[in-house]
Image (spheres, rainbow, N blue to C red):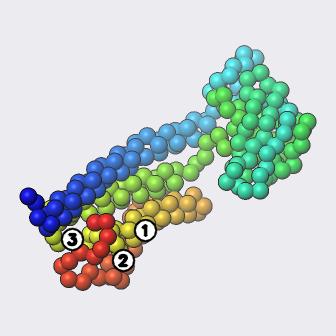
Amino acid sequence: MVDGGGGAMMVTRFKGALLIVASVLAALACWSAFSAWLPSGLGRHREYGEAAPCPGRAPVQRYEDCLRTVTFTVEGTDIPRAKKKGYRATLSGTPFWDGTVAFGDRDPLLTELRPGDRVTGTVWRGEVMTIARGGARQSTADEPRDEPQMPVALGTGAGLLAVLGLVFGSALLLRPRRRERFVWQPYGKRLLILTVSASFLVGLLGVWTGLPWWLVPGVAALVVWAGAVLIYGWDRPEGDMPRTGIF
């Protein structure tokens, strides 16, 4: 028969093992972001920038590596007040690419369009990249963008979460009686919130400011490290007994 203390240690070790498993999953997410997501985005943007206009006499196909200029007729637009619902335009008049096109914003052209208007569209690899009318031009949500800062930041955040899970999980698994610095309240919860929010904000600021993507991991890690120092310095553990919480 297992006494109460032994049972509590078993539960603590089990939680530590779960955290280590979670850290492995976070590490895989980090690896995927840097090995697949980032190269794919950079490569697609480079290929789009290097794409040449389609030859005038080349037969029109649905999927083409060249840039095809076509004329669309606007069937209608969807411009909701809430930005999170997305902005759309329904286009027709082409042999393959008719349908609904998504945009990241309502300006500079979408709000000016009315049913029946004619717009010039640029098509690449079967997707509408831009539409234009007069002197106004607007990119669609499918156009590749040179914004690698966000995937790098999220990948870095996943890596930092992997380290956090490994450290906390190892502490709970190997030292279940002395875990005052590795409890959920306040340390684990605060570190989790700090890591997720800092990674996202650094990525967002990197996109806005044009920060080179290779600087993003260092900046995100520095912000998380500084926050961790403040968290542990602000609320030091007292005694050897853990605070109440799920860990």
Q: Considering only vertical position in the picture, is 155 above or below 127?
A: below
For discs 3 and 2, the disc positioned in front in the rendered view = 3
Q: Which residue is mark 1?
A: 194
- Could you tell me residue 68's position as x and y percent? 73, 28
Q: Quote the CA–CA distance across marks 1 and 3.
A: 20 Å
Left or right, 127 with respect to 12, comes to right
Nearer to us in this view, 143 or 17: 17
Crowding near the residue tagged with mark 2, few <14, some 14–19, many ≥20 C-alpha atoms within 10 Å: some
Q: Residue at x 35, y 74 (%)?
A: 186
Q: Residue at x 73, y 23 (%)?
A: 96
Q: Which residue is mark 2?
A: 231
For discs 1 and 3, the disc positioned in front in the rendered view = 3
Q: Quote the CA–CA distance across marks 3 and 2.
A: 16 Å
- Could you tell me residue 15's position as x and y percent? 25, 58
Q: Quote the CA–CA distance across marks 1 and 2.
A: 10 Å
Q: Secondary structure at mark 3?
A: loop
Nearer to us in this view, 130 or 227: 227
Q: Earlier in the sequence, mark 1 or mark 3?
A: 3
Q: Secondary structure at mark 1?
A: helix
Q: Secondary structure at mark 2?
A: helix
- Could you tell me residue 160's position as x and y percent? 36, 59
Q: Is residue 174 visible?
A: yes
Left or right, 123 with respect to 18, comes to right
Q: Which residue is mark 3?
A: 179
Q: Earlier in the sequence, mark 1 or mark 2?
A: 1
